Amino acid sequence: IAGLMCSAIISDTLLYRSPTCTPLDRMAAEALAKIAGIEVEEYGMQMFEAGSDLKSKSDADIFYQDFKKFSAGDTQFGVGQITSLDARELKKIHARLSNMLPKAKAEHGLDMIFFMLTNILDESTLVLCSDEEALSVASRCFGVSVTKDGDSVFVDNMVSRKKQFIPKMVGTLQE
């Protein structure tokens, strides 16, 4: 039970890298790890590697694995997220999902869709955008340029949709 509880904390806090992580989370996880006889960093890496093996999943399964809808004023938008330890895997997912965003936008009747490809190790996120308007909003929101791929923006020091992406995006859309 201690191992399961520790796993939940590691997952929720992205191995203490998420801004949602509190000192109490870290203290509880370390105490639970001691009871379970696991080394947190090594165990967390193994856990994320197992959880981020997306080769056998369809594009739709990956896209909708962690997809949520939001609103800011009159704007309805969707945000999906995948986390991984492997930058190469994230590049492959980027290629697979790029075409899904415009389709999902139309299917759900949303104004824009963003998909966060989050690298846990370097605490960064490549944000795929459904169209030119979404690219413009994301670029303005995070003060970054559109990537050379032309369908995304790269944001350093961002891993949390809840604490980092959504509040800034809502604020930008309400300006």
Image: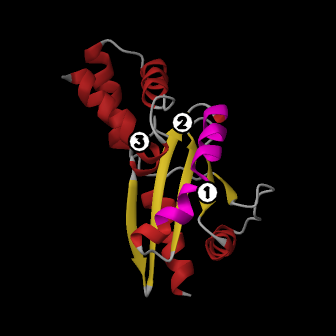
Q: CA distance from mark 1 to mark 2?
A: 14 Å
User: What label does residue 13 carry, if any?
Assistant: 3
Occupied quadrant, residue 149: bottom right
Q: Is residue 59 magenta?
A: no
Please state which amino acid type lies under the numbered disc 1: Val
* Residue 90 visible in image: yes
**Residue 158, percent from left and from top:** 58, 53
Neighbour class for label 3 at 10 Å: few (<14), some, many (≥20)?
some
User: What label does residue 152 carry, if any?
Assistant: none
Occupied quadrant, residue 101: bottom right
Q: Residue at x 57, y 32 (%)?
A: 85
Q: Is residue 96 magenta?
A: yes
Q: Helix, strand or loop at disc 2?
A: strand
For mark 2, what is the residue? 84
Please state which amino acid type lies under the numbered disc 2: Ser
* Residue 26 visible in image: no
Please state which amino acid type lies under the numbered disc 3: Thr
169, 57: nearer the viewer: 57
For mark 1, what is the residue? 127
Q: Which residues are magenta?
A: 88-104
Q: Nearer the viewer, mark 3 or mark 2?
A: 2
Q: CA distance from mark 3 to mark 2?
A: 14 Å
Neighbour class for label 2 at 10 Å: few (<14), some, many (≥20)?
many
